[in-house]
Image (tube, coloured by chain):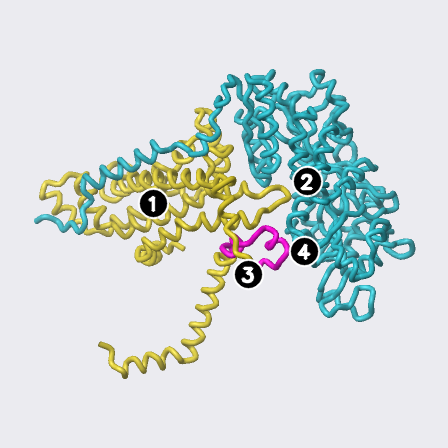
Chain colours: A yellow, B cyan
Amino acid sequence: MTSPDTRGRRRREALRPASLLAYLVLAVGAVLTLAPFLLSFLTALKTPRQFASQSPLAWPDPVTGENFAELFGGGGFVSPVVVTAQVVVVVVVGQLVFSIMAAYAFAWLRFPGRDGLFWLFLATLMVPQVVTVVPLYTMFSAVGLSNTFWALVLPFVLGSPYAVFLLREYFRGIPADLLDAARIDGAGTWTILWRVVVPLARPIVATLVIITVVTHWNNFLWPLIITTGPTWQTVTVATAALQGQHDSNWTLVMAATTVAIAPLLVVFAVFQRHIVSSISLTGFR
Amino acid sequence: MTPPVPHPLTRRTLLGSALGLGAAAAAGCSPAAQQQRPGDSGAQRTVTVRLWDEQVEAAYRTSFDAFTAANPDIAVRTTLVPFADYFTKLTADVQAGNADDLFWLNGSYIQPYIDNDLLMEIGADFDAQRPGWIEPAVQQYTRDGALWGVPQLTDGGIAMYYNTQLLEAAGVSPAELADLTWVPGGGEGDTFLPVMQRLTVDALGVRANEDGFDGDNPGTWGYSAAQDLQGIYYNFLGSAGGAFQDAEGRFVFDSPEGRDAFGYLVDLINTHRVSPDAANTNDNGDFTRDQFLQGKIAVFQSGIYNLKNVADGADFSWGIVPIPAGPRGRVSVVNNVVVCGNAAAEDADAVTRVLQWLGSPEGATPIGASGAALPAVTDAQPAFEEYWSGQDVDPSLFAEQGRQPSIGAPTGERYGAALTAWKPFFNEMFLGRLPVEEALAQAQQAANEAIEG
């Protein structure tokens, strides 16, 4: 139990000028970080006329839900949310399964050219996504897969160099004695991987889930290029499509972005503890 | 010794994951797919049309319902692609053979499609319809006697929207505003600048024609001068007697007329301070419109494409008057949009029939009746005017200005690359940081180098 003396000392420390300054800086940082989200939400609650005729910072008056109603009624936003969720689920599961297997092979299995192959694989991290877009588009068009669900997931479902790198480094930190003991007990490679290594690697796996969900929920360039029309539109592409040549539709766009970030907030709430540890593990921002 | 297993991933977990993956993959069906399934109408042939305007897309659906009722063997589907990505995506899709059977194009982007034989010629099958299309649109898309698209939308000419209350506060009547003239360099005979100065008020309520006016602290601007190609500077250049491009598509705006027009605009912003600073407008094409709708700009010069935005967004009384006349009168840019047939379309006969429908008054009337845009099919235009007269708005001024002398609309291969090349110089010019003469010379050289590749 904390004594009154300790509490008093903490209060005095908290009131020191240096601490006050730190809190002030943190408060300003928090406001700057949260303000765009708040502005987005408040704009979504305005009528287009109010948005056009008043300052963007004006409070919604009257508060309206018409933008959300239009989004899910005439705006056809249900399909993009469903499609994006399907893509994210398939990609997350696929990337985890294949990246874990690849990382384990690179970390613990011995085969000729292992390290060379790993560094070659890792080098693909340096290739910007935009460079591969045209060849990928050509390949998918040639086999008739453009504007399909598989075109959205296939380039990503078989793992990513980043995930393999993170997992391999983490796997290598697991004591070899542990794996040897399992082997002495009769466990094979498959059993060691899924019953020993992966359970011990839960923090990094959780980190990868977060990174992959966020990355693919927000993916824009590839879905934009490979899909056409409403059938396989993802959330990001559907949001961009709300803007016309001469009509920016800001209230509708802000309603869409509010809806788009909601699942990410849920992911954050569920994985909050892991996100904090993931920052220390990866420097992920 | 058995190694510690904190939370083992069991076979059940793995199996569950695999099943989840399979279920998600199997569920890889889109709710939107069920809404757009071809053949629902019983038609054996399907034609697809790609466009960038959501409002016109809704009008097209009405139009195509009527088409399919009259042509039960052909169903028509629309594909909406956002304007910001439209031309990049269309280029990729045409090259890969994934483009729609019909697609919209504008004057800035059509040339490469013509040069590479990617479009169906609008030939003898359309001869009976051609007199029914507005002539500037036919001219804009005709090359060496061949027409390459069926005119769909026209912007008409440019005009000025005004805020009645701000005019009344300045003692300016709409009639006075409707009869203004600008003169290069200002001075004698220039009636435009004095009116805009009366309409401009600083934060302390001092007008720009009064002593003590502080342009650094704006309250209300009189006019919407900005680096706006279609709404502003093409029209000033045309009214000065200049051209932006010559017949071969080369840029020729660095001319005495160009220096007059751009010099006048830059002075409105940086010397007379009757328009917002270019720092606000160079990269935000909506700034002047938004400020007008918020009652902070008295006169907003723009096209029919902003009619709906103004009608929906303005909570004050407003009206429309003609643009100011320059040394060569009122000269406006008239831009048009056409729908083109894909030369690689499998069912050329069906594509031709849909094109003919879109070029007919019956096919184009839903566009006008929705109020979304002015149809380029002459007999469909009354539907547009009827829609807006029902909203107590008279849009006829745009069509009227469109029939006046015009300056050539943007055209030519690599126009987009040229725009990217000249824009940095225009940015500096409108900011008042680069003299007009130097900026125009450098911008023109950069633009012409860009089109030469």
**x, y (%) of residue B131?**
77, 23
Residue B56 placement, left or right of B134 = left
Q: Earlier in the sequence, mark 4 or mark 2?
A: 4
- Over which residues does the magenta segment extend? A40-58
Which residue type does callout 1 highlight? Ala
Q: Which mark is residue B418?
A: 2
Q: Earlier in the sequence, mark 1 or mark 3?
A: 3
Q: CA distance from mark 4 to mark 2?
A: 29 Å
User: Residue pushed farthest right?
Assistant: B188
Above or below, comparing residue B18 to residue B359 in the picture:
below
**x, y (%) of residue B142?**
74, 26
Above or below, comparing residue B111 to residue B423 in the picture:
above
The residue shown at (56%, 36%) is B81
Which residue type does callout 2 highlight? Ala
Q: Are marks 4 and 1 on the same chain?
A: no
Which quadrant does the C terminus of chain B fall into?
A: top right
Q: Which mark is residue B291?
A: 4
Residue B357 placement, left or right of B225 = left
Mark 1 chain? A
